[in-house]
Amino acid sequence: MLEVRDLRKSYGDDPVFAGLRFTIAAGEAVAVEGRNGSGKSTLLKCLVGAETQDAGEVLVDGVVRDEASASFRALTASLLDDADYFPDVSVVEHLRLVAWLHGTPEPEREVLDVLGELGLSEVRDQLPPTLSSGQRHRLGLASCFVRPRGLLVLDEPEQRLDTQGRTWLRERLKAEKAAGVAVVFASHDRDLVEAVADRSVLL
């Protein structure tokens, strides 16, 4: 599902990573690990085209990644940094739009199920800018899970989740793998890495 070939990225004269190679098949998960500042977030941004690598290739489903491609956008769900959202519609309306735009079967049922899973039902009618940072993070996760996906890219998805939320996240990502989704995520949570990842990429 995902193949990274000799990826290199630098900022000026400072290399972030070079010669990076790994693959992820459908139903597998890879954790990106490293100290703060090691380039984990930069790598994930390069995978989805939010940043441009200096050299190398990223292939998704056998095709060189093109972030402008409709097929790439249909296949790839990601949560990097703060979530994007439609600021002038409510939480539930935002998720309905995401689900509808991506052709989710039974979008209303999917939206209500994900709202319940992530503890957002009580704030479903609020505008996203009025949410706490933790609620906005969960909205970002919800936006990934209400839409079809073959590749899931997450940057520290455990952040701002309590113990119960982290337990839910571990089980949800294992369910994603069981459904055939390829998962790549950066995390400092050892329990999450050990429960979900088939292997790790160290930066």
Image (tube, rainbow, N blue to C red):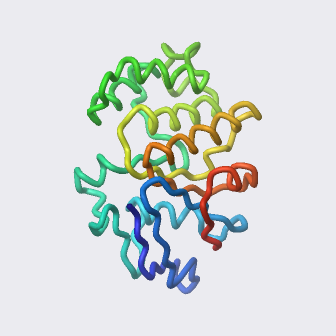
Count the numbered circles shown: 0
Q: Please state if 153 lies on the left or on the right of 159 as rendered.
A: left
The residue lying furthest to the left in this view is: 70
> In the figure, 180 relative to 167: above or below?
below
Image quadrant of residue 100?
top left
Residue at x 60%, y 70% (from the top left corner)? 201
> In the figure, 50 relative to 180: above or below?
below
Point out residue 138 in the picture as x, y percentages from the top left corner.
58, 33
User: Which residue is more in the foreground, 162 or 105?
Assistant: 105
> In the figure, 191 relative to 14: above or below?
above
Q: Please state if 33 lies on the left or on the right of 154 as rendered.
A: right
Residue at x 33%, y 27% (from the top left corner)? 97
Point out residue 42 in the picture as x, y percentages from the top left corner.
53, 65
Residue at x 57%, y 52% (from the top left corner)? 155
Point out residue 150 in the picture as x, y percentages from the top left corner.
38, 49
The residue lying furthest to the front in this view is: 178
Residue at x 45%, y 39% (from the top left corner)? 144
Q: Please state if 70 lies on the left or on the right of 30 as rendered.
A: left
User: Which residue is more in the foreground, 124 or 151?
Assistant: 151
Image quadrant in which the C terminus is located: bottom right
Image quadrant in which the N terminus is located: bottom left
Point out residue 123 in the picture as x, y percentages from the top left corner.
56, 16
